[in-house]
Image (tube, coloured by chain):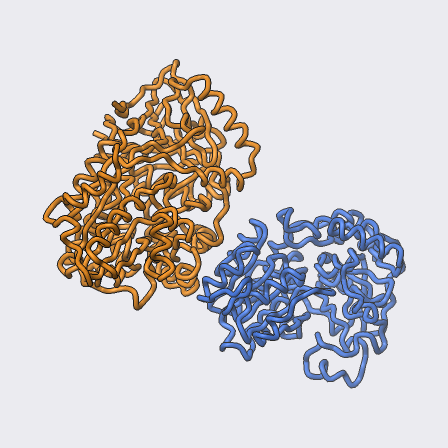
């Protein structure tokens, strides 16, 4: 079968790091990713199913992996060679259309009894992603045993499969997984804080796919009196407004806007007041620093965009008793709600372009520059791949 | 004998016409056969002995006022308020006219044994003046005598202890002015009347007032009913200030008003060619224009701004009168009209203008896009008496680079206004209704106004309201050579060249619409019949 494969190759990894720093997405052309004909992954157990991807999205974490900018933290919890792709809508052998829930939890790994987190329904925090009857891998798409969506076939445990309603298009279905992350982020943003009261005002930093989906999720929850979003590009601004943001500003305007909306003063770059919850959907040094500048004393910064090793002045976090909190993936309820969110907010429109596997370099370059090129989500379209049509 | 202003009909022999364009100039050929250019009068003669004229005015007041020495006595509380950095434009060569007048007043006060004297820069909601700016306005001798002991300072409209509510007009307008001025035995106001809008009761009722008081006339309704605010008798802005003046008088505030007018000798060498009529340029003028223009093209904007802001105008005092406010202002206004008025017959379809690098609110600062709007649609559009120069539904074309740039210290609330308010709406009524209060009462802007050098939080709103009459009157506004994004944010259309702009204007007024160019510098006031 045809698959994009990411191998452990130190020299190529170094080349990807250089290329990725010169131009985002360039790591795909010079790094360890290659289009190969490989054997389909074996079914790890009788209950497992083969999934033939129809669309598979390209995520920010994929790009970080390809450009070698992601953290070495992942090394023990991934297994090589792996096929990327964890945002997947595909077909089962019986013809049913499914979305894959990529988290490789205790249930998927056959670990009994499950870890405390899985047992409590917080599968996204699973303590056993490198253990059990499966090779290490925090998600499908980072595990050598399961394969990934950037191929014509992968395998999935029944606990990972969600049926796609007939009325839902592939474009919509491929956005369910990232939308679930957004639902999770929005839900956490409404939780109790030790800040100045209920989280009624939220700032979202970044209006890429994750940022826009988070705006939509916040709007659907409808529990915030104010949602401020930073967006660099005109189409992002337009979409953020359509999806429910109250204020859409360019990144350099955020501090001034929050200051004025919250009646805050300033001490240097730092707002004296600020907004109760800031959701950082970028995860860069700059976005995290900006989040700390505009978050209210006692407020919370949710890190939704995947960070890596970051340089950050945490003095204000200490002084203002700010909570910096990670926000990874989702639980079952988030995933179920994501279907509704995608349908109600018509999020299929965020899929801007699709590519065949053979044009993976173009696809990844497009995804890496999506904002500047007027795009949001770029995906691989496997529906016309020859191998996929074989019985 | 200075030549009066006049209206030139443009024909094929007319040379290209000068347009100010921020920190630069452009020569533009205007279409013959349908264009006229309004040229300002030449500068009137300067007073030969300005210090003698000041002293004469103080001793021979107008109206029912006693001479100043008769109003001064030992033990009295005397306050001298003076116009701030917004006047004159550009800043004048030393000695500033305020210095001449204040020194004369202080000499008389000293002769009368008056010890309790305060000097206040009457800046209303403008930014505070720096020490250097105050020194330039009042002179080193006065500054050194009063500032160190805290008796020379900037008005603070947000000092709750420093303001006094004196009453309300019959229309319910609250009159609140500087407490020291209100409670003095005599308030001497030292004014510079650069345009007809300045002076009169507006000096005290605006210059020393608070937001609580100013909001009654600095609003959209007032501006739309001031046609124009350069014509006191048809200006709701002035009517309101005059009503407030009555409250001031009735509440016992005693004012001795000193008003001065300046001639329009605006630019020194090498920029004096700007003041000449193009066909009278000599070889030296042409060479200077070319050399200056080329040099400016290569000069970084920041440096060009510094060069222009350092210009000190050769403005000379053309009249001074003192005494009772209204009697003084009547004479002052006549003197302003004598210098600036040009008779113009009929309105035009398209009004063109070149906007300079400076307006009252960016002295030693940056001409940001909101100020471009205010200068073009607020000030220049309103340089009329009778009827607007451009007909209702006509097009205004102004030439200015309109950079997306703001002075972070002077104009912090402007930045937010531009980013947050104008991104939402450019309708003055909506802006006033939805946003004014939050900016006016913003604690951060208040802090910066009081302790830094920032314009008050509400000030960008006033700039927008200043253009409200024009926005309602015009069918379109086009900016030539401006930053396209900034121009669009203002709600206007950008054009690369004047020809493009005229082509775009034809969509609104039809082909071959009449064009009138408001030539400046110097400033003029069109008397449109």
Residue at the image point whose x is 44% and y is 43% from the top:
B367
Towards the viewer: B90 or B14: B90
Looking at this rendering, what residue extends furthest in the left direction?
B64
Residue at the image point whose x is 21% and y is 35% from the top:
B335
Q: Against B422, is B252 above or below?
A: below
Instruction: Answer with left or right where residue B404 lies relative to residue B390.
Output: right
Q: How many marks?
A: 0
Looking at this rendering, what residue extends furthest in the top direction?
B13
State the image coordinates of residue B134 (x, y, percent, origin top left).
38, 51
State the image coordinates of residue A3 (x, y, percent, origin top left).
83, 56
Q: Against A13, is B322 above or below?
A: above
State the image coordinates of residue B103 (x, y, percent, origin top left).
28, 48
Residue at the image point whose x is 47% and y is 66% from the top:
A265
Towards the viewer: B111 or B428: B111
Tell me the orange chain. B
From where the camera sits, is residue A337 visible? no
Rendering quarter of residue A339: bottom right
From where the camera sits, is residue A39 visible? yes
Classify the position of the N terminus of chain A by image quarter.
bottom right
Q: Against A223, is B404 above or below?
A: above
Instruction: Answer with left or right where residue A62 lies relative to residue A34.
Output: left
Towards the viewer: A286 or B162: B162
Q: Colour of chain A?
A: blue
State the image coordinates of residue B496 (x, y, percent, origin top left).
49, 31
Classify the position of the C terminus of chain A by image quarter.
bottom right
Towards the viewer: A344 or A61: A61
Instruction: Answer with left or right where residue A279 lies relative to residue B332.
Output: right
């Amino acid at each position: 079968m045809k698959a994009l494969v990411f191998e452990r190759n130190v020299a190529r990894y170094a080349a990807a790091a250089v290329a990725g720093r010169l131009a985002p997405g360039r790591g795909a052309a010079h790094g360890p990713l290659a289009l190969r004909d490989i054997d389909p992954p074996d079914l790890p157990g009788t209950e497992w199913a083969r999934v033939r991807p129809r669309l598979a999205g390209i995520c920010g974490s994929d790009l970080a992996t390809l450009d070698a900018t992601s953290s070495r933290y992942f090394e023990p919890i991934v297994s090589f060679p792996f096929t990327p792709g964890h945002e997947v809508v595909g077909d089962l052998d019986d013809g049913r259309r499914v979305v894959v829930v990529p988290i490789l939890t205790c249930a998927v790994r056959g670990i009994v009894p499950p870890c405390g987190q899985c047992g409590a329904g917080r599968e996204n925090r699973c303590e056993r992603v490198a253990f059990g009857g499966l090779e290490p891998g925090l998600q499908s798409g980072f595990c050598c045993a399961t394969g990934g969506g950037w191929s014509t076939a992968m395998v999935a445990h029944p606990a990972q499969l969600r049926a796609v309603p007939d009325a839902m298009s592939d474009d919509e279905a491929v956005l369910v997984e990232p939308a679930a992350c957004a639902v999770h982020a929005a839900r956490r943003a409404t939780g109790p804080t030790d800040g100045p009261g209920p989280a009624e005002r939220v700032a979202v930093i970044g209006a890429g796919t994750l940022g826009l989906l988070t705006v939509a999720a916040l709007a659907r929850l409808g529990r915030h009196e104010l949602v401020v979003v930073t967006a660099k590009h005109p189409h992002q601004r337009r979409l953020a407004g359509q999806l429910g943001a109250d204020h859409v500003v360019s990144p350099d305007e955020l501090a001034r806007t929050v200051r004025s909306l919250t009646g805050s003063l300033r001490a240097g770059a730092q707002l004296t007041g600020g907004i109760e919850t800031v959701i950082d959907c970028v995860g860069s040094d700059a976005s995290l620093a900006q989040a700390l500048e505009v978050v209210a004393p006692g407020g919370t910064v949710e890190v939704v965009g995947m960070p890596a090793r970051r340089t950050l002045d945490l003095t204000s976090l200490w002084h203002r008793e700010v909570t910096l909190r990670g926000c990874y993936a989702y639980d079952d309820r988030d995933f179920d709600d994501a279907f509704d969110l995608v349908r109600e907010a018509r999020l299929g429109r965020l899929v801007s372009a699709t590519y065949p596997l053979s044009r993976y370099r173009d696809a990844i370059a497009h995804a890496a520059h999506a904002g500047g090129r007027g795009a949001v989500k770029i995906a691989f379209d496997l529906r016309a791949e020859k191998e996929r049509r074989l019985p | 004998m200075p030549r009066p202003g006049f209206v030139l009909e443009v024909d094929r022999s007319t040379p290209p016409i000068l347009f100010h364009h921020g920190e630069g100039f452009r020569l533009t050929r205007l279409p013959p056969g349908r264009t006229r250019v309004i040229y300002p009068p030449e500068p009137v003669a300067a007073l030969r002995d300005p210090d003698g004229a000041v002293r004469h005015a103080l001793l021979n007041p107008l109206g029912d006022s006693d001479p100043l020495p008769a109003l001064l006595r030992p033990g009295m509380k005397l306050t001298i308020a003076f116009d701030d950095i917004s006047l004159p434009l550009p800043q004048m060569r030393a000695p500033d006219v305020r210095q001449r007048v204040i020194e004369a007043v202080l000499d008389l006060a000293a002769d009368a044994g008056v010890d309790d004297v305060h000097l206040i820069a009457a800046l209303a909601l403008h930014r505070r003046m720096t020490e250097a700016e105050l020194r330039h306005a009042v002179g080193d001798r006065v500054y050194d005598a009063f500032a160190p002991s805290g008796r020379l300072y900037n008005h603070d409209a947000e000092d709750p202890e420093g303001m006094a509510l004196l009453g309300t007009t019959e229309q319910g307008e609250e009159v609140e002015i500087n407490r020291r001025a209100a409670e003095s035995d005599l308030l001497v106001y030292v004014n510079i009347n650069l345009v007809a809008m300045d002076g009169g009761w507006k000096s005290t009722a605006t210059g020393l007032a608070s937001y609580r008081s100013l909001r009654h006339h600095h609003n959209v309704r007032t501006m739309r009913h001031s046609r124009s605010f350069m014509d006191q008798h048809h200006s709701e802005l002035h009517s309101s200030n005059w009503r407030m003046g009555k409250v001031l008088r009735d509440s016992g505030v005693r004012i001795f008003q000193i008003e001065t007018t300046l001639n329009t000798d605006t630019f020194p060498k090498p920029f004096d060619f700007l003041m000449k009529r193009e066909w009278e340029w000599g070889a030296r003028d042409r060479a200077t224009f070319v050399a200056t223009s080329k040099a400016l093209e290569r000069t970084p904007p920041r440096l060009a701004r510094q060069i222009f802001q350092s210009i000190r105008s050769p403005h000379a005092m053309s009249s001074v009168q003192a005494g009772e406010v209204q009697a003084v202002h009547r004479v002052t206004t006549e003197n302003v009209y004598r210098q600036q008025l040009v008779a113009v017959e009929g309105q035009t379809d398209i009004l063109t203008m070149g906007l300079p690098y400076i307006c009252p609110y960016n002295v030693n600062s940056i001409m940001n896009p909101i100020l471009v709007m205010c200068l073009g649609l607020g000030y220049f559009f309103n340089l009329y008496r009778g009827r607007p120069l451009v007909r209702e539904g006509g097009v205004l074309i102004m030439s200015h680079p309109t950079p997306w740039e703001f002075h972070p210290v002077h104009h912090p609330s402007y930045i937010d206004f531009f980013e947050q308010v104008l991104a939402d709406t450019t309708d003055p009524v909506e802006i006033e209704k939805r946003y004014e209060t939050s900016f006016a009462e913003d604690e951060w802007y208040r802090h910066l106004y009081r302790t830094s050098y920032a314009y008050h939080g509400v000030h960008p709103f006033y700039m927008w309201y200043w253009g409200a009459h024009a926005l309602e009157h015009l069918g379109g506004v086009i900016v030539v050579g401006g930053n396209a994004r900034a121009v669009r944010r203002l709600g206007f259309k950008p054009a690369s060249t004047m020809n493009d702009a005229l082509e775009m204007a034809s969509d609104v007024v039809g082909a071959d619409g009449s064009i009138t160019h408001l030539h400046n510098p110097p400033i003029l006031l069109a008397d449109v019949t």
